[in-house]
Structures are given as structure tokens and as C-alpha cells.
Amino acid sequence: MDEEPVVSAPRVTPVRSTLPWPLRALLGFLAAAMAAAAGVAIYEYGRDFAGPDRRELVVHNEQLAAQLREAAAERIALQRWPIRTKESLKVQRAAQEQLMQQVRALEEETTRLKDDLAFYDSLLPAGKATRES
């Protein structure tokens, strides 16, 4: 008869860690933080190695900003040009209107003076007027 041998052993209890859970959590957090720092360092090294240098990008950005400032100044100057032109045109029109008023006033004075001359010519005797002419 084949009987199986019976093993008599005491009951096995699970082995527990001797570290308390807050310390284990702290160690896990530190391990994750170190892994993240290593990842960032590798990323920065790879970016500097493969991509353009940050200094070059900063210089290029400053050049573009200077070009933008120049273009903005030129745009403002070009926007002011029509305003200055309109103002100049208004001044010229006002001057022209003033000159036209002066011309009208002088024409009226000329007409009045001609009328006065004709009146005074009519007062002179007819004989003297013909001898002097």
C-alpha cells in the first residue's frame, strides 16, 4: 500500500517587512523623484545635443523682436502720413478760400473805384477832359 507520507510541519506565517508604511511611501516617492529628475536630465541633454542651442534661439528671438518693433514703427509712420496729408490739404483749402475772399473784396473795391472815377469824370467840364487827353 502506497500511503503517502504525512508531513507534519508547523503552520507557515507570511513574512512582513520591518519598515513602517510611511517610510516605504517616502522611499517610493524618492525613487520616483529621482527617476523623474533623471528623465528631465536626459531630455535636456538630448535637446542640447540634437536641437538648436537655447542661446541661438534667444538671439534669433531678439532679432525677430527688433524687426517687429521696426515694422510697427514704420506702420505707425505710414498710418500718420494720410492724416498729415489731409491736414495739409485742409490748410491749403483754407488758404485758398481766404485768397478767394480777398480777390472778391479787391474786385468789389475795383468796381467801386471805377464807379467813383466815372462819377468824377462826369463832373469835369467836357472841354478840359478832351484837351488833356
Image (cartoon, rainbow, N blue to C red):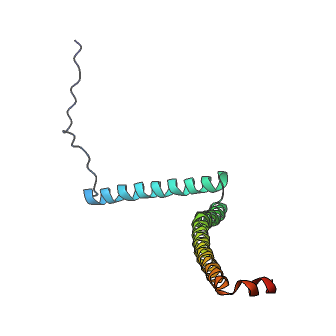
Is residue 20 among what the camera can see? no
Work out whether residue 52 or residue 128 is closer to the camera in this orientation and state it.
Answer: 128
Quadrant occupied by the N terminus: top left
Which residue is farthest top?
1
Q: In this view, does 100 lie above or below 53?
A: below
Give the quadrant of residue 70: bottom right
Tell me where residue 67 appears, x and y as whole percent: 65, 63
Work out whether residue 100 or residue 40 is closer to the camera in this orientation and state it.
Answer: 100
Is residue 9 among what the camera can see? yes
Tell me where residue 95 appears, x and y as whole percent: 60, 74
- Left or right of 47, for residue 12: left
Give the quadrant of residue 76: bottom right
- Left or right of 10, for residue 77: right
Tally of numbered discs: 0
Q: In this view, does 22 lie above or below 132?
A: above
Work out whether residue 82 or residue 112 is closer to the camera in this orientation and state it.
Answer: 112
Tell me where residue 49 appears, x and y as whole percent: 66, 54
Residue in the image at 69% along x and 87% along y: 125
- Left or right of 69, for residue 133: right
Quadrant occupied by the C terminus: bottom right
Residue in the image at 41% along x and 56% along y: 31
Q: In this view, does 95 lie above or below 69?
A: below
Tell me where residue 58 appears, x and y as whole percent: 62, 64
Which residue is farthest front?
127
Work out whether residue 22 or residue 79 is closer to the camera in this orientation and state it.
Answer: 79
- Left or right of 104, for residue 127: right
